[in-house]
Image (cartoon, rainbow, N blue to C red):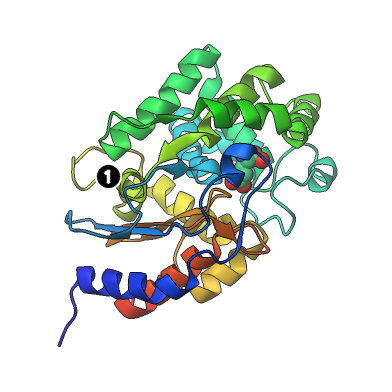
């Protein structure tokens, strides 16, 4: 008997029950350390608008680095191909907040999904605007893409990010020293810390990322979000660079473009078919959601979803 999408999602969710709580919750700021490690949510949204959800898919979590995909989209829309003069598209092979590589490569970050690269895309989003306008643009982009006006920042997370963001200040100052930031370091980072602090549910995240599965057009509203060629590039960068220093492993195991964040979320794109968002706060040794990755691997296998 052929199983439906809802049945596959439910089956994967049930399989994950025994693993709930696995991994280690990020503890560099209190708001993340306090999250219940046993949470698990999964949402699949197809390009036809079919939704299948499991568990805590309704519960907001901290988007953290997944936001980098969206500021990359915004920066590409503002700067076009010129963005690639300021940021590369190679896996870093280093930690997400590494500064060593930046020195060797004259302040041009390896890719837009590590912190230094995301600070550059944020600078592009901020160009010619006030901090508040930059922050509002990011919030509105999420609200529009997810078709949900309730999406907002967690001010406490944004504040804690700023209080503990010494490495991000180092990266930004370094790049400013190499003339790769146009706005003031403090201004760029205020916007960057806010984008990391977006609160989002699996359902909202799958909805917000659906345009990436449909060549840059939101299939449900019909709106073009970004060009077809830029969409291919975003997906390529997600595949090669979306999982910190375990991006190769994720491509190997799951075979789909994805971006994880230290809040325990992962956005995954199935080109031509669907967007998947999963959330489970416990992280593996590479900073990727342990149970989330496992769930994606099983779902992709069940559905026969892979770009290869
Ligand atoms: N807010 C974190 C930082 O900039 C992002 C961590 C992440 O999800 O990779 O350090």
For the C terminus, the image quarter is bottom left
Quadrant hosting ligand 1: top right
Look at the image and tell me whether residue 183 can be seen: no
Nearer to me, 92 or 29: 29
Tell me residue 22's x, y (percent).
56, 67
Q: How many marks?
A: 1
Residue 71 drawn above or below residue 58: above
Tell me residue 105's x, y (percent).
79, 44
Tell me residue 73's x, y (percent).
45, 39
- According to the image, label 1 marks what residue? 217
The residue drawn where x is 69% and y is 49% is 96
In the displayed structure image, the side of residue 272 where residue 263 appears, left or right: right
Nearer to me, 47 or 14: 14
In the displayed structure image, the side of residue 229 where residue 287 appears, left or right: right
The residue drawn where x is 50% and y is 67% is 291
In the displayed structure image, the side of residue 140 where residue 38 appears, left or right: right
Look at the image and tell me whether residue 189 can be seen: yes
The residue drawn where x is 80% and y is 43% is 99
The residue drawn where x is 25% and y is 44% is 218
| Res 152 → quadrant | top left
| Res 142 → quadrant | top left
Tell me residue 210's x, y (percent).
31, 50
For the N terminus, the image quarter is bottom left
Query: In terms of secondary structure, where does tag 1 sit?
Result: loop
Nearer to me, 192 or 149: 149
């Amino acid at each position: 008997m052929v199983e439906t999408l809802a049945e596959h999602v439910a089956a994967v969710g049930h399989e994950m029950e025994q693993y709930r709580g696995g991994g280690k919750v990020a503890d560099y700021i209190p708001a993340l350390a306090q999250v219940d490690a046993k949470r698990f949510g999964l949402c699949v949204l197809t390009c036809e608008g079919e939704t299948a959800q499991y568990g805590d898919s309704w519960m907001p979590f901290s988007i953290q680095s997944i936001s980098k995909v969206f500021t990359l989209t915004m920066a590409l829309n503002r700067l076009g191909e010129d963005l690639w003069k300021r940021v590369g598209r190679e896996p870093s092979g280093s930690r997400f907040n590494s500064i060593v590589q930046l020195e060797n490569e004259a302040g041009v970050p390896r890719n837009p999904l590590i912190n230094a690269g995301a600070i550059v895309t944020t600078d592009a989003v901020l160009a010619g605007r006030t901090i508040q306008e930059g922050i509002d643009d990011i919030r509105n982009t999420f609200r529009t893409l997810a078709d949900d006006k309730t999406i907002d920042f967690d001010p406490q997370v944004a504040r804690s990010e700023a209080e503990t963001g010494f490495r991000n200040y180092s990266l930004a100052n370094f790049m400013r020293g190499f003339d790769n930031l146009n706005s003031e370091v403090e201004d760029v980072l205020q916007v960057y810390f806010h984008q990391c602090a977006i609160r989002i549910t699996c359902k909202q995240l799958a909805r917000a990322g659906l345009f990436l599965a449909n060549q840059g057009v939101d299939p449900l509203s019909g709106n073009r979000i970004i060009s077809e060629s830029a969409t291919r590039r975003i997906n390529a960068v997600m595949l090669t660079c979306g999982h910190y220093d375990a991006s190769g492993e994720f491509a190997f195991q799951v075979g789909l473009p994805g971006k994880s964040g230290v809040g325990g979320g992962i956005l995954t794109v199935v080109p031509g078919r669907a967007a998947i968002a999963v959330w489970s706060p416990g992280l593996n040794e590479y900073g990727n959601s342990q149970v989330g990755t496992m769930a994606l691997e099983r779902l992709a296998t069940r559905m026969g979803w892979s770009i290869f």
